[in-house]
Amino acid sequence: MLSQRTFSIIKPDAVRKGYSAAILAEIEKAGFKIVSIKRLSISKAQAEGFYYVHAARPFFGELTEFMSSGPIFPMVLEKDNAIADLRKLMGATNPAQAEEGTIRKKFASSIGENAIHGSDAEDTAAFEIGYFFAGHELK
Ligand code: GDP
């Protein structure tokens, strides 16, 4: 799809380890334009709102605790076929199963602390962009 937007987060584990710039470099090298980016920390309640689709999962507490454990870089990315292409660049949820060359293979340490988030569909991308960015930040 032509010039599509997606939403991504550099997660607290990757920020803590000093991988933020290296991950951004991978994203730019893959042809994504960084439309907007910010650095912030979120509360557990804010993480619960972001991940509400996972509320019934057994790892929900761990996930929201982790996502609120330190600074993150939420960002909006743009390129042709952005949603699918970012998922490919990220690699499998569990880094042990991620392909060579993917961000999770290079930078993630476990299925929970897996360095990066990327939207999985157009409707979730729209919700997630709106959760972190106002319209005037997305020109
Ligand atoms: P994604 O789309 O590849 O990020 O994976 P999912 O949508 O399935 O899960 C969302 C996020 O929840 C993942 O990126 C992980 O951070 C976390 N997660 C998924 N499975 C597990 C698990 O078994 N244990 C823990 N602690 N976290 C998990």
Image: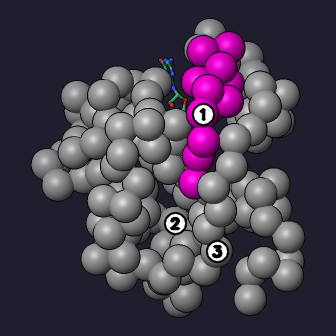
Q: Are marks 3 and 2 in contact (CB under 8 Å)?
A: no
Q: Which mark is residue 70?
A: 1
Q: Is residue 118 above or below residue 138?
A: above
- Residue underneath mark 2: 83
Q: CA distance from mark 2 to mark 1?
A: 26 Å
Q: Nearer the viewer, residue 59 or 39?
A: 39
Magenta residues?
A: 61-73
21 sits left or right of 33 in the view: left
Q: Secondary structure at mark 2?
A: helix
C-alpha span from label 3 to label 1: 20 Å
Image location of residue 36, percent across then percent down: 64, 74
The amino acid type found where label 1 is placed reads Gly
Q: Give the numbered dot on residue 6.
A: none
Judging depth in this view, the residue of 9 and 38 nearest the camera is 38
Does the image show residue 89?
Answer: no
- Identify which residue is drawn at 30% across, 66% down: 26
Would residue 63 be counted in the magenta stretch?
Answer: yes
Q: Position of residue 87 (x, y in %)?
A: 42, 56
The location of residue 101, given as percent across then percent down, is 17, 55
Looking at the image, is mark 3 or mark 2 nearer the viewer?
Answer: 3
N-terminal of the pair, mark 2 or mark 1, is: 1
Residue matched to label 3: 36
Vertical order, 119 against 51 (above or below):
below
- Residue type, mark 3 in image: Ser
Residue displayed at 62% across by 10% down: 58
Q: Determine whether, in the image, residue 98 is placed left or right of residue 33.
A: left
- Examine the structure image and report whether residue 20 is included in the region drawn in magenta: no
Element assignment for label 1: loop
- Mark in front: 2 vs 1: 1
- For label 2, count other residues whose C-alpha is less than 10 Å away and answer few (under 14), some (14-19) or many (20+): many
